[in-house]
Image (spheres, helix red, strand yellow):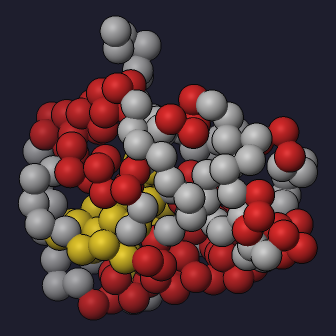
Amino acid sequence: MKTIYLMRHGETLFNQQKKIQGWCDSPLTELGKKQALIARDYFVRNKIELDSAYASTSERACDTLELVTDMPYKRVKGLKEWYFGDLEAEHEYLNPPLPYGDFFTKFGGEGEKDFRARVAQTVLELAREDQGKTILMVSHGASCRQFMREWEHKTKIDLQGRIANCCILKFAFEEDQFELLEIINHDFSLIV
């Protein structure tokens, strides 16, 4: 059995500004950097030794991973966030109510099923091919949520609301099956 930690990046400038952030990118804020260090402390405190690491090709995911661990890692396009087409970098009030479905396809973006399949296939391939037992993958909020939905039939754990910055989803992986074991949300209330 392998353990896969799927994690969302830290807070970014566009998160602060309430902008739609898919394939477009913005830097981590100071708060986002501190969130990543708290996530790093989670792995250290729990004596979790990572065998390998992967990140979305987006700067915000790579920068988060580099604050969590100093080990070498691979950048993977398939871990990228949902592509929102012409609505990239626009204000979040333009988002429809959930679920989004194929809303973004009329703006040149990805449909929900295609996006979910991309992320699920990418994580599956990485988990299959990696020889390590404990693997970290840093991705994005919607990517993590869609992966959870792909495997919700295998778990009793659910998360109401959004996936917070630097939230970690702990999955068991065995015989091409993922089971969500734990959702690790950090306490950021003491950050100054």
Most foreground residue, 60 or 46: 60
In the picture provided, is 191 more to the left or to the right than 176? left
Above or below residue 176? Residue 84 is above
In the picture provided, is 73 more to the left or to the right than 61? left
The residue at 30%/27% (across/down) is 34
Quadrant where the N terminus is found in the figure: bottom left
State the image coordinates of residue 78 (x, y, percent, origin top left). Answer: 48, 78
State the image coordinates of residue 127 (x, y, percent, origin top left). Answer: 33, 81
Q: Using the rendered image of the protein, determine whether residue 86 is visible from the camera's viewpoint.
A: yes
Res 81 → quadrant: bottom right
Res 146 → quadrant: bottom right
In the picture provided, is 86 more to the left or to the right than 19? right
The residue at 11%/45% (across/down) is 47
State the image coordinates of residue 56 (x, y, percent, origin top left). Answer: 40, 66
The residue at 58%/82% (across/down) is 118
Above or below residue 86? Residue 169 is above
In the picture provided, is 136 more to the left or to the right than 154? left
Res 100 → quadrant: bottom right
Above or below residue 93? Residue 177 is below
Quadrant where the C terminus is found in the figure: top left
State the image coordinates of residue 184 (x, y, percent, origin top left). Answer: 42, 41
Most foreground residue, 97 or 27: 27
How many numbered circles are shown? Answer: 0
Q: Using the rendered image of the protein, determine whether residue 101 is visible from the camera's viewpoint.
A: no
The residue at 67%/41% (across/down) is 19
